[in-house]
Amino acid sequence: MAAANPWDSATAPNAAGLLLGHFITSKLVTEEMLNISKKSTSCFVNFSRLQQITDIQAEIYQKNLEIELLSLEKDAADVVHPSFLAQKCHSLQSMNNHLEAVLKEKRSLRQRLLKPMCQGNLPIEAVYHRYMVHLLELAVTFIERLEDHLETIRNIPHLDADLKKMSTALAKMDILVTETEELAENILKWREQQKEVSSYIPKILAEKNSLHKHDVIVPPLPLTSKVNVQTINAK
């Protein structure tokens, strides 16, 4: 038989029920608050939620481990993966074969190296022909610019002196530019003065011509004998 709820006002009146009824009538407690207090949550629900959280955390941890393993596999793929290992083995085998061929032809190679290289042809595999063409272009370009590069290297110790000379030359150039500007201004002023003088010359000539037209010509006076006598007496 279920025990009576002391907070339920519908059951037999007791001290708790009377006190609760007094709170309800005084509106200190509402029916909604009582209904909420009646709902009891079982502790097993919390345990189930805790179990779910633990399972999710374990799954996250497992996924993180898988991600770390995949990242490690990706980083070490060139060492561990069979395809990369096969490529490395093939490269090592070809290198080993090349070294064996060099060792077999060691004597002939030594004799060939002792001879001077002049207009000799070196056999190159067809795979490397395009690289050799590019290499030859770079070599030709380098040889063409070799003298310039050597000259630049030779001039490195004299850079400070060259810079000083350049600064001095620039200062002189500035002075010459200033003098040239002043000379140009003087030439322009002289041209303007010449234009003014040349404009006055026709006026002066016109005035002289007008004066010659209006001048009166005075005839020379005749010399008399009296003048001659006076000069003789004076002597």
Image (cartoon, rainbow, N blue to C red):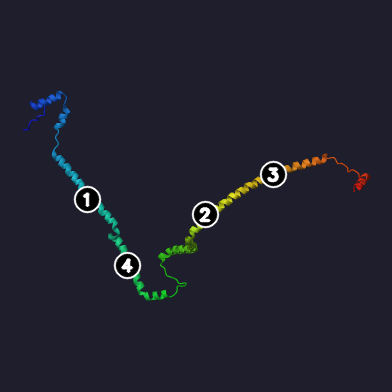
Query: What separation in Å lies between label 3 and label 4 (alpha carbons)?
Result: 97 Å
Q: Residue type at mark 1: give it.
A: Gln
Q: Is residue 162 visible?
A: yes
Query: What separation in Å lies between label 2 and label 4 (alpha carbons)?
Result: 64 Å
Q: Which residue is mark 2?
A: 167
Instruction: Please identify, in this view, whether the residue under mark 3 or under mark 2 is nearer the observer.
Output: 2
Instruction: Please identify, in this view, whether the residue under mark 3 or under mark 4 is nearer the observer.
Output: 3
Q: Residue type at mark 3: give it.
A: Lys
Instruction: Please identify, in this view, whether the residue under mark 1 or under mark 2 is nearer the observer.
Output: 2
Furthest toward the right, the residue is 225
Q: Residue at x 22, y 50 (%)?
A: 62
Which element carries disc 1, helix, strand or loop? helix
Query: What separation in Å lies between label 1 and label 2 (alpha carbons)?
Result: 73 Å
Q: Which residue is mark 4?
A: 93
Residues at marks 3 and 2 touching, judged by CB atoms closer than 8 Å: no
Q: Which sits earlier in the primary sequence, circle 1 or circle 4?
A: 1
Q: Which sits earlier in the primary sequence, circle 2 or circle 4?
A: 4
Q: Nearer the viewer, residue 211 or 43?
A: 211
Q: Nearer the viewer, residue 143 or 231?
A: 231
* Residue 108 locus on image (x, y percent): 39, 76
Q: Residue at x 52, y 54 (%)?
A: 167
* Residue 135 locus on image (x, y percent): 44, 63
Q: Which residue is mark 3?
A: 195
Residues at marks 3 and 4 touching, judged by CB atoms closer than 8 Å: no
Q: Which sits earlier in the primary sequence, circle 3 or circle 2?
A: 2
Q: Which residue is mark 1?
A: 62
Q: Residues within 10 Å of mark 3 (few under 14, many from 20)?
A: few
Furthest toward the top, the residue is 25
Q: Is residue 147 above or below residue 46?
A: below
